[in-house]
Amino acid sequence: QVQLVESGGGLVQPGGSLRLSCAASGSIFSINAMGWYRQAPGKERELVATITTLIISGSTNYADSVKGRFTISRDNAKNTVYLQMNSLKPEDTAVYYCNADSYGIITWGKGTLVTVSS
């Protein structure tokens, strides 16, 4: 099994930056992709960004709403995936969840709240 723990959320002003972290443990060698999703109040959970594999060089994918502002990356030595969020907007306010895909077996973290407000 895979366990995921997110961190790095908080309150930030519009235009500011935050970096989220997602530490994976357990059966990490089974993971073929990881991603960040978010869920704003009253809305469905949506994809933010994904990155393939923790072991070999992976490709990334972003939602149109965050392209050019957010960057997903990974540190294989730390079994951690990051989401660097720049130029934050109030509409980025949401609970951000880390996700791991182990060839169809999906694991979710508990989420971390990001609030963008002046």
Image (spheres, grey):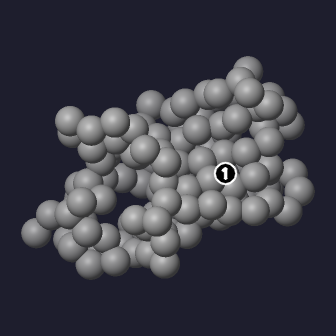
Kindly identify the residue that appears in the image at 62 percent across and 28 percent down: 107
Mark 1 is on which residue type? Thr
Q: Secondary structure at mark 1?
A: strand
Res 48 seen here: yes
Kindly identify the residue that appears in the image at 65 percent across and 27 percent down: 106
| Of 109 and 44, the residue lying toward us | 44
Q: Quadrant of residue 61?
A: bottom right
Position of 16 relative to 26 (above/below): below
Where does label 1 land, which residue?
Answer: 80
Where is residue 22 shown, x and y percent of the image? 57, 47
Is 60 on the left-hand or right-hand side of 12? Answer: right
Q: Residue furthest front?
A: 64
Look at the image and tell me in which quarter the C terminus lies: bottom left
| Count of numbered tags | 1
Where is residue 114 shown, x and y percent of the image? 30, 53
Q: Residue furthest right?
A: 56
Kindly identify the residue that appears in the image at 42 percent across and 54 percent down: 8
Kindly identify the residue that appears in the image at 79 percent across and 31 percent down: 103
Q: Quadrant of residue 86?
A: bottom left
Q: Residue furthest left?
A: 118
Other-residue count near label 1 (Cα within 10 Å), few / some / many at <14 / 14–19 / ≥20: some
Where is residue 38 shown, x and y percent of the image? 40, 45
Position of 9 relative to 26 (above/below): below
| Of 101 and 19, the residue lying toward us | 101
Res 6 seen here: no
Q: Quadrant of residue 77?
A: bottom right
Look at the image and tell me in which quarter the N terminus lies: top right
Position of 15 relative to 32 (above/below): below
